Image (cartoon, rainbow, N blue to C red):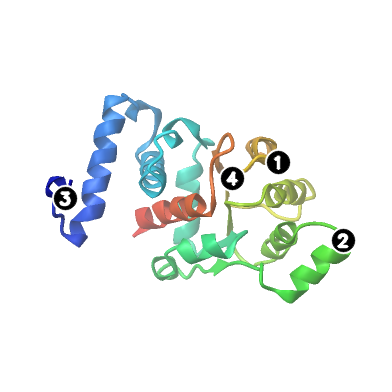
Amino acid sequence: MLEKIQFVKPEEIEARSMAIIEEELKAKNAFHRWSPGEYAVVRRCIHTSADFEYADQLYFSDGAVETALRAIKDGAHIITDTKMAASGINKKRLSVFEGQVHCFMDDPQVAREAKARGITRSAVCMEGGSQVEGKKIFAVGNAPTALIRLYELIREGKVQPELIIGVPVGFVNVVESKELIIQAGVPCIVARGRKGGSNIAAAICNALIYQCS
């Protein structure tokens, strides 16, 4: 088995991976579905997960990628629902445009507020994120309650995100929360169905950030 493994230089691994993804997507004749910016997001999600079902499950509202790129270049901040998503975002590249990544999960006040109100910390984190000054992109990869609260905040006129990345993973209210965001009337990128995760949320953020560089 070892003799079948090809040596690839570290700096070439990602390029080779992307080439393999491109070949398989060509075989599926899938390219006509996406703009170049959307394709960069799809490819990054597949690269992160090795799951080609994202080619079918990723939903882009009209002009979502272009709106997000403008916002990032204008210094938009990214608010996440998990530390894992926050840690996976390329902060150095984002900081070129003076944007920052925010995650409020470790804030003691968030924990107290969530306990007092009987709601999840992720929902309270979205409330904190709505108060971040400037343009905002919300990246949710774990908690459907975060998407539900975001939807409510939008309906209440308390926040108007430049983009919502809705990719929580799981079973309870996951599909429904994603569909809510699609109906919310704001630019969005959503992984329809049960699949997703914090790593996918970070991958989408990075796919957007890299297009701005």
Q: Secondary structure at mark 3?
A: helix
Residue 20 at x, y percent in the picture: 24, 40
**Amino acid type at image mark 2:** Arg
Of the 4 image quadrants, the one containing the C terminus is bottom left
107 vs 38, left or right, is right
Around disc 3, counting alpha carbons within 10 Å, would you say few (fewer than 14), some (14 to 19), or many (20 or more)?
few
**Amino acid type at image mark 3:** Leu
Please identify the residue farthest to the right as the structure is shown: 116
Q: Residue at x 27, y 45 (%)?
A: 18
> In this orientation, does residue 76 appear?
no
Please give the label number shown on residue 117: 2
**If you read the primary sequence from the N terminus, does the residue marked by circle 2 or circle 1 appear first?**
2
Q: Nearer the viewer, mark 2 or mark 1?
A: 1
In 3D space, how far apart are the residues under numbered discs 3 and 1 (Cα atoms)?
43 Å
Residue holding disc 4: 169
**If you read the primary sequence from the N terminus, does the residue marked by circle 2 or circle 4 appear first?**
2
In 3D space, how far apart are the residues under numbered discs 3 and 2 (Cα atoms)?
57 Å
Q: Secondary structure at mark 1?
A: loop
For residue 25, above or below residue 117: above
Callouts 3 and 4 close, C-beta under 8 Å: no
Residue 203 at x, y percent in the picture: 44, 52
Residue 110 at x, y percent in the picture: 75, 69
In 3D space, how far apart are the residues under numbered discs 2 and 1 (Cα atoms)?
20 Å
**Amino acid type at image mark 4:** Val
Q: Nearer the viewer, mark 2 or mark 4?
A: 4
Q: Residue at x 72, y 50 (%)?
A: 145
For residue 119, above or below residue 39: below
Residue 116 at x, y percent in the picture: 87, 65
**Amino acid type at image mark 1:** Val
Please give the label number shown on residue 2: 3
